[in-house]
Image (cartoon, helix red, strand yellow):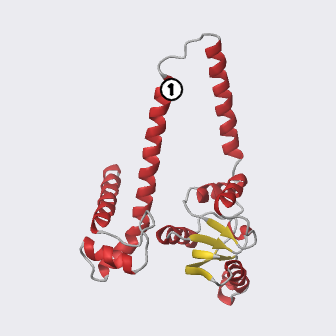
Amino acid sequence: MKGKFVAYYRVSTRKQGASGLGLEAQRTAVATYLGGRTARVVVEFTEVESGRRSDRPALERALTAARVHQAALVVAKVDRLTRSVAFLSRLLEAGVDVRFADLPAMEGPTGRFMLQQMAAVAELEAGLISSRTKAALEAAKARGQSLGGNRGSTLSSKARASGRDRQAAIAQRRANDLAPLIEEVRAAGHKSPTEIARALTERGIPTARGHREWSAPQIIRIEARLQRATRELQRRG
């Protein structure tokens, strides 16, 4: 096994968390899965939480760390992560590669596909509705009924706008993930964009494109994005 990983462990009770009951077994499962060769766990998080809840702060921190380090999230058992289909859907939107020690085949595209199947009921229904709508439009067109306007052009424009919105959302999420780390670096005395870029490089934090070296313009763009988001929140408030 190669690459960087963020480990997430969950115990159901505070007594288990204090005693380590169940926790060591999870660590052992993760270590066995990783194989102890070139894989590296950059940070680990332990949640004392009920599996029925989806508001898990340690898991949110683990997902953030995985995005910041561009690492995969590794969990000992699939049932340790969630029993909620809705939560799985949010996990799929988190932009993190998730691995399960008890299901080694679940990685990369195959793993994401299997996760999607676990949360696919609503998505399937939406797809069926879309197919029925498309079939109805084709039937109307075959009857000579005017559908109005240049629909292909409109849909293409909407698709492009949706793509831009998605890229902007990904960039904003990346900036939000990095904001606490940038503040930590500033508190350590690195004030200028050049100093912050050097500090992130020294800490091994990859850029959005996976590069090792940060530059001052990248820091300036991130800080500008954070400032715009702050102003927008103040305006709405």
Please tell me how many numbered marks the rendered image carries. 1
Q: How crowded is mark 1: few (under 14 residues within 10 Å), some or many (20 or more)?
A: few
Question: Please, is residue 36 above or below residue 114 in the view?
Answer: below
**Residue at 65% of width from left, 58% of height from top?**
109
Q: What residue type is labelled 1?
A: Gly
Left or right of 39? Residue 172 is: left
Task: Work out which residue is located at the far left of the displayed protein and give it.
Answer: 192
Question: Please, is residue 158 above or below residue 50 in the view?
Answer: above
Where does residue 82 sit, x and y in percent of width and height? 69, 64
Left or right of 228? Residue 75 is: right
Question: Please, is residue 237 above or below residue 69 in the view?
Answer: above
Name the foreground residue: 235 vs 58: 58
Task: Work out which residue is located at the far top of the displayed protein and give it.
Answer: 144
Where does residue 52 sit, x and y in percent of width and height? 69, 64
Where does residue 223 sit, x and y in percent of width and height? 31, 63
Name the foreground residue: 41 vs 88: 41
Q: Where does label 1 land, which residue? A: 152
Mark 1 element type: helix
Q: Quadrant of residue 122?
A: top right
Task: Work out which residue is located at the far right of the displayed protein and give it.
Answer: 102
Q: In which quarter of the image is residue 164?
A: top left
**Residue at 63% of width from left, 27% of height from top?**
134
Name the foreground residue: 197 vs 66: 197
**Residue at 50% of width from left, 31% of height from top?**
155
**Residue at 62% of width from left, 63% of height from top?**
54
Q: In which quarter of the image is residue 217?
A: bottom left
Where does residue 96 sit, x and y in percent of width and height? 56, 63
Left or right of 219? Residue 100 is: right
Quadrant location of the N terminus? bottom right
